[in-house]
Amino acid sequence: MRRILFTPILRVKQYGSLAPAMTPRAAISVVSPAIPWRAQVTRDQWRAFWAVFLGWVVDAFDFNILTFILIDIQRSFTVDRALAGALGTVTLIMRLVGGAAAGTIADKYGRRLPLMLSVLWFSLFAFLAGFSTSYTMLFALRALFGIGMGGEWAAGMPLVLEHWPARLRGLASGLLLGGWYWGYLLAAVAFQFVYPLFSATPDLAWRTMFWIAIIPALLTLWIRRNVKESPVWLERRRRIQQSARDGTGAAEPNISLVRIFQRDLIGTTIQTTAVLGAFMCIYYSVNFWYPTFLREAGRPTLPYLAAFNIGAIIGTAAWGRLSEGVLGRRGAVTITVVLGIASLPLYLHARDPWLLGLGALMMGAFGMGIWGMAPAYTTERFPTSVRGVGPGFCYHAGAAIGAVMPYVLGAMQDHGFGLVNSMTAAMTVSGLLSAGLIWMGPETRGRVFTATDAA
């Protein structure tokens, strides 16, 4: 590997124009394309990846286990489907609180601390949910769980993507989001093999699913010992401290949450939130009630959810990688949306088990492929000074928009609409919105992160 000391790089200004900038302080690696991409990632970069990836896996497990036990919760607390769906809705809304808080902390104090706190938080409240004695108590605990769930994304995604090379950011983005589907798959496995051990006592069985969630808290010990802080954030802090000593600048910036609503960034904040909101509506349209769809049809959940999540794991990584080429982030999103909508007839309407399984695989690979671009796209929209709170707020404000889908689909069923037709209509409308909204913003592929990048 050859190193040079002065290399022109491209710094993003005003989120559209690209201007050359010199980087005399940091050596920039010039990597031969013949070297496999895995060899281009350092040990520290891999450790940052695994910390966030595993956190996202357990985050997904803790959230998605709820979708398997909605029927049991309805029976335990005698609530209708709208209230059962509201457990998902309140979690998603409260993610916005966690994302804004953790993102602000991540911009001021570094990415690692709020990442660890978030993993501890959501593990604790997922565990406590298993002790709920009423629907109201369960509702409150799932709301608190949502705060930690929101913080994990806001702190974790910039930690990884500021570590990794820009040329591999799309791939890292796709691999990270694949962690969500690994977590969903683990939830399906737990429901298949752990739940039956307690199924003779249904009220105990669903609680056991929540109690398992305390195990991931141990991940924070490994993060604290092995994962280094973002080098981009550290360089930015060094520059701020130096300017304060020299009397050439303020020692600390204003609260970063306020910054994303100022004139030059508010358009970015609104458009990115709208894109992520449409993405979330797609996900919860086809996903939240899917285990219920399978259980009511008398089908085993594990084979179909395995097909869905394996497809999604492959799809997010593949489309994230493809978005580094001529398609860009916007083109890759558009293609996955079209193919996802085309997968609906097999995913929900097929009768033959093999065709239904093929539909699940296709919906995972295509319909969920949009998420391969989401971490890269959101982090590339914002400068370093707000790269924690900006993506964190937009992602979880989008989740709050998507949060209406579990409740709306539940209410539609209570009013006589079929589950399959409700899911199909919601996915189609959400997909078309996603494909349109992504083109209202700039292409972000290839943007370089620096300590002084400007808004």
Image (tube, grey):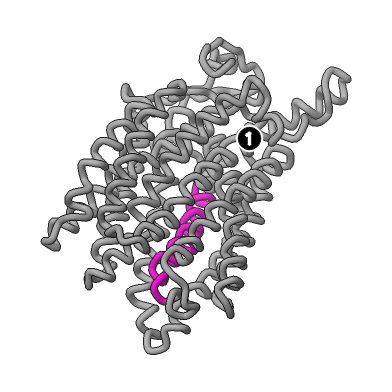
Residue to which mark 1 is pinned: 231
Q: Position of residue 436 (x, y in %)?
A: 37, 28
Residue 162, compared with residue 245, is above or below; it is: below
Residue, x 44% and y 38% (percent of image)?
Answer: 374
- Figure quadrant of residue 64: bottom left
With 440 as the anchor, is 315 left or right in this view?
left
* Disc 1 secondary structure class: helix
Task: Name the residue type under label 1.
Answer: Pro
Nearer to me, 289 or 9:
289
Quarter holding the C terminus is: top right
Magenta run includes residue 64 = yes
Task: Report the magenta residues as a range.
Answer: 49-72
Q: Farthest residue in the left direction?
A: 352
Q: Farthest residue in the front direction?
A: 415
Crowding at mark 1 (Cα within 10 Å: few <14, some 14-19, many 20+): some
- Figure quadrant of residue 70: bottom left
Asked if residue 31 can be seen in this view, the reply is: yes
